[in-house]
Image (cartoon, rainbow, N blue to C red):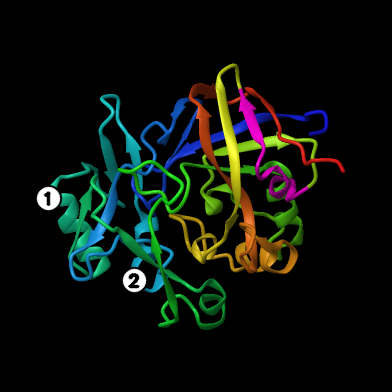
Amino acid sequence: MSAAGTGTVTGLSRYPVKSMLGESLTRVTVDARGLDGDRRWAVLDAESGKVASAKQPRLWRGLLAYRASLDEAGEVRVRIPKLSDLAAGDPALDAELSEALGRKVALTDTPPVGAILDRARPEQVLRAGVTAEVEADVVAFGSAAPPGCFFDFAPVHLVTVATLDRIAALSARARVEVARYRPNIVLDTSEAAFAEHGWIGGELRIGPELVLRVIASTPRCAVPTLAHGPLPRDLDALRVPAAHHRVPALPGRAAEPCVGVYAQVVRPGRIGVGDEAVLPQPDIK
């Protein structure tokens, strides 16, 4: 490895309920299960038995109208638009979601055995729209995460300010909201846009304790293009990486639009906004 570069943590976020909006943090503990409280609950579709995910926007894009957070006691609460908060596990919340989504659903903090979700093929969604029936791939949960969580793949997702700025510069709206890509950690570095892809296989150190191993680039689904609470739809959130950063997320896979990287936790620790990060560097031959 070459000499390590550095960066600074500029944002921390967790998403206590899968596919709902999350909350920004200033400090948080990170262990093998990711950021404390992240992706601990999900919405389960009673008819199919599958986990509801906005990756299938025809059915589940409405989940992005709800915001989940942890209260002072560490309990997950969901903000109902124009109403009060309800606790995860409250039958009233399940009833509200079922009515709003048009399907009988319930929140669960226990992944079903063999838990799966549908991931609509994102470029078909771009062409046909969010209400169209398009092909979907069935995705098993958390192949690089500990059991008992609702991560699609790995427990930590990172992106750099440079990558977000580049997408914004190439977008018709000349902006991109970080919430669209749902990262846990945002880093400001001196590296170029999409440099994260070169970190795969390396260790990233944040603050005095936390060590992460970067394991894959993050392939993007239709979620960044969807309305997120008050944020409108933005097709460029997927079109730009599709045109400018199409790479294999893992060796042996076909190239696909990627933004950010996934990581596993090598050594747990507490991190905060403003902490220094020591970046992985690609091998120099």
The C terminus sits in image quarter: top right
For image coordinates 13% across by 51% down, the residue present is 92
Residue, x 27% and y 39% (percent of image)?
A: 77
Give the Cα separation between the discs numbered 2 and 1: 21 Å
Q: Mark 1 points at which residue?
A: 91
Indicate the quadrant where residue 117 lies.
bottom left
**Near-viewer residue (102 or 41):** 41
Disc number placed over residue 59 in the picture, else none = 2
Judging from the image, what secondary structure is the residue with disc 2 in? helix
Task: Reply above or below: 120 against 187.
Answer: below
Give the residue type that dot 2 points to. Leu
Measured from the top left, where is residue 265 in percent x and y? 51, 33
Per the image, is 47 magenta? Answer: no
Which image quarter is the N terminus in? top right
Q: Residue at x 29, y 24 (%)?
A: 72
Q: Nearer the viewer, residue 76 or 29?
A: 29
Q: What element carries label 1?
A: helix
**Residue 198 lies within the magenta run:** yes
- What range of the chain is rendered magenta? 193-206
Q: In this view, does 243 lie to the left or right of 26?
A: right
Image position of 142 with respect to 214: above or below: below
Tell me the residue at 41%/50% (across/down).
Answer: 142
Q: Dot 1, how many residues are within 10 Å of its Cα: few (below 14), some (14-19), or many (20+)?
A: few
Which tag, 2 or 1, sits closer to the chain's start? 2
